[in-house]
Image: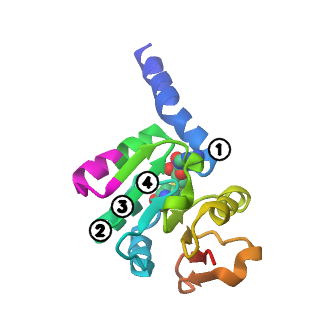
Amino acid sequence: MLVEYIISIFIIFILFPLAIAGKSMAPWVPTRKADVTRLLELLDIRQGDRFFEIWCGDGRVSAAVAKKFPQVKVLGIEIAYPIFFIAKLRQAFCGNPNLSIKLANAFKQDFSAYSHVYVYGMPDKMAEKIVPKFMKEARQWSKLYSYVFSIPDEYRKNVISYGEENQAKIHVLEKK
Ligand SMILES: C[S@@+](CC[C@H](N)C(=O)[O-])C[C@H]1O[C@@H](n2cnc3c(N)ncnc32)[C@H](O)[C@@H]1O
């Protein structure tokens, strides 16, 4: 009886939110640590810039950016509260006042305030939702960094892809 009760709680409070998140945009698969380091090297962030991680997962990317660039405001948004909770713990341990982690649907966030937007999401959602939203709302010269998944071909002339053959690609779309 107790075991059934625990299993039900686990399904309702842990698996169900994760399944919804996976269906919404992308399941939780974090950016590899070595690739977070590569991203930090790619970011050409200046004073006054703002960084937004669309689906922040456990917050590792947002936390690393906030740590490396303390002058930059960093926002990470996650929809599944078990993972959001991990990201909040990370934020508490990090102690960077420039880092903010929110539980919300990232697709409802206005992109216009962010000069650098990072995403690791499924290619169909990228093509249907994220890239068009970025192109519509982001300010000129803002950059969208897409981990692994390529940006649709129609934007190819504004995209630079980074990564050796044995590395995951980081595709950078600049709004011109
Ligand atoms: C592939 S993971 C990437 C995590 C993180 N960006 C990273 O690179 O380590 C995608 C994350 O998006 C979250 N997610 C899915 N749909 C979402 C939505 N509509 N709003 C916010 N987060 C969402 C999932 O719960 C999952 O944690």
Q: Secondary structure at mark 3?
A: strand
Q: Is residue 30 visible?
A: no
Q: Amino acid at mark 1?
A: Lys
Q: Circle 1 sits on which residue?
A: 23
Crowdedness near tag 4: few (<14), some (14–19) or many (≥20) residues, C-alpha within 10 Å: many
Q: Circle 2 sits on which residue?
A: 71
Residue 45 shown left or right of residue 20 in the figure = left
Q: Amino acid at mark 3?
A: Lys
Real-space Cα separation, disc 4 to disc 2, in angstroms: 16 Å
- Magenta-highlighted residues: 88-99
| Disc nearest the viewer among 4 and 2 | 2
Residue 99 shown left or right of residue 118 in the figure = left
| Disc nearest the viewer among 1 and 2 | 2
Q: Circle 3 sits on which residue?
A: 73
Mark 4 or mark 1, which has the lower sequence index?
Answer: 1
Crowdedness near tag 3: few (<14), some (14–19) or many (≥20) residues, C-alpha within 10 Å: many
Q: Is residue 63 above or below residue 27?
A: below
* Location of residue 16 in the rendering, given as x and y in whole percent from the top left corner: 55, 33
Real-space Cα separation, disc 1 to disc 3, in angstroms: 29 Å
Crowdedness near tag 1: few (<14), some (14–19) or many (≥20) residues, C-alpha within 10 Å: few
Asked if the residues shown at circle 1 and circle 3 are in contact, with their CB atoms under 8 angstroms apart, the answer is no
Mark 1 or mark 2, which has the lower sequence index?
Answer: 1
**Screen quadrant of the N terminus:** top left
| x 29%, y 46%: residue | 89
Does the magenta portion include 104? Answer: no
Q: Amino acid at mark 2?
A: Gln
Real-space Cα separation, disc 4 to disc 1, in angstroms: 19 Å
Real-space Cα separation, disc 1 to disc 2, in angstroms: 35 Å
Q: Circle 4 sits on which residue?
A: 76
Q: Is mark 4 within 8 Å of ligand 1?
A: yes
Real-space Cα separation, disc 4 to disc 3, in angstroms: 10 Å
